[in-house]
C-alpha cells in the first residue's frame, strides 16, 4: 500500500475482497479502494490524506499471448508437449495453478471433459476417493468476468481437495485454467488464486 500518512492517521485493517477491491478501515470508518486508483480520505481530525492501494509481492507473466500477475512466493515452470504449452505455479502448501494453451481448433468443451476425466484417473491411481456427486459447476471471476467451470472434489487420505477447471477461447487459442488445493489451505490459497484470476488477460 502506498499512502501519505499523518501521525494520527491509522489504518487498522486491510482485507482483499471480491473483484480486486480493498476494504480499508480508517479511524473506524470503512472505505473501499480499487487497486492503483488514488483517493482522498477525510480523517477524524479534519485532515485529508491521499491514498493509493496496491497489492505487493507479485510478479507478472506475459508470454504466449496471455498475461497475469501471481504471488512471488509461487514457483513458475513451463513446458511444451504434443503441441500444447503449459504454465504451472506452485507454492509450498497445496496451491497449484495451471494454464494450458491449445490451438484454436481444439474444442474448449472437449478439453474440459478430458481434463476432468484425466484428473479423476490420475488421482484414483494415488488412492483418491470421490463423493457421490464429485463434479459440480463453479463460478470464478477471471479476467474481468465471471466464468463457469467444473469442480472435481476428492480426498487423498484424510485430506479433502478441490480441482477447478475453466476453459475458454481467447486470442485465437483455446485455454484451460486449473486451480487446485487442499480444503485445509483454502484461506491462503484463495487469496493467491484471486490475484492470478482477476489479473488474467
Image: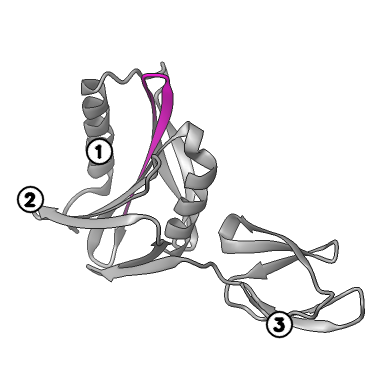
Residue located at (26% from left, 32% from top): 119
What type of secondary structure mainly makes up the magenta span? strand
Position of residue 33 measured from the top left corner of the image (x, y, whole percent) = 67, 69
Q: How far apart are marks 1 and 2 (CA)?
A: 15 Å
Instruction: Decide which of tag 1 and tag 3 comes sooner along the chain.
Output: 3
Residue located at (44% from left, 62% from top): 143
Residue contact at pointers 1 and 3, CB within 8 angstroms: no
Q: Crowding near pointer 1: few (<14 within 10 Å), some, many (20+)?
A: some
Say if the magenta span includes residue 42: no
Q: How far apart are marks 3 and 2 (CA)?
A: 52 Å
Element on which disc 2 rests: loop
Residue located at (18% from left, 51% from top): 106
Position of residue 164 measured from the top left corner of the image (x, y, whole percent) = 39, 40
Circle 3 residue: 4
Residue at the outermost right position: 45
Circle 2 residue: 82
What residue range appears in magenta? 153-168
Quarter of the image with the C terminus is bottom left
Q: Which of marks 3 and 2 is in front?
A: 3
Q: Nearer the viewer, mark 1 or mark 3?
A: 3
Residue 115, label in figure: 1
Residue located at (42% from left, 24% from top): 159
Q: Distance between the residues labelled 1 and 3?
A: 48 Å
Q: Quadrant of residue 68?
A: bottom left
Amino acid at each position: 500500500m502506498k499512502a501519505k500518512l499523518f501521525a494520527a492517521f491509522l489504518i487498522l485493517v486491510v482485507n482483499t475482497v471480491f473483484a480486486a477491491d480493498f476494504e480499508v478501515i480508517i479511524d473506524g470508518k470503512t472505505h473501499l479502494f480499487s487497486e492503483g486508483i488514488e483517493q482522498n480520505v477525510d480523517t477524524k481530525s479534519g485532515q485529508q490524506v491521499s491514498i493509493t492501494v496496491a497489492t505487493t509481492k507479485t510478479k507478472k507473466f506475459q508470454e504466449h499471448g496471455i498475461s497475469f500477475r501471481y504471488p512471488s512466493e509461487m514457483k513458475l515452470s513451463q513446458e511444451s508437449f504434443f503441441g500444447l504449452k503449459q504454465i504451472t505455479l506452485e507454492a509450498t502448501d497445496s496451491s497449484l495453478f495451471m494454464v494450458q494453451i491449445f490451438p484454436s481448433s481444439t474444442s474448449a468443451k472437449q478439453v474440459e471433459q478430458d481434463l476432468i476425466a484425466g484428473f479423476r484417473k490420475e488421482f484414483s491411481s494415488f488412492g483418491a476417493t470421490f463423493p457421490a456427486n464429485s463434479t459440480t459447476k463453479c463460478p470464478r471471476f477471471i479476467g474481468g468476468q465471471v466464468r463457469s467451470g467444473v469442480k472435481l472434489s476428492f480426498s487423498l487420505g484424510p485430506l479433502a481437495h478441490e480441482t477447478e477447471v475453466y476453459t475458454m477461447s481467447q486470442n485465437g487459442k483455446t485455454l484451460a485454467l486449473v486451480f487446485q488445493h487442499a480444503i485445509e489451505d483454502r484461506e491462503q490459497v484463495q487469496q493467491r488464486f484471486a490475484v492470478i484470476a482477476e489479473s488474467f488477460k
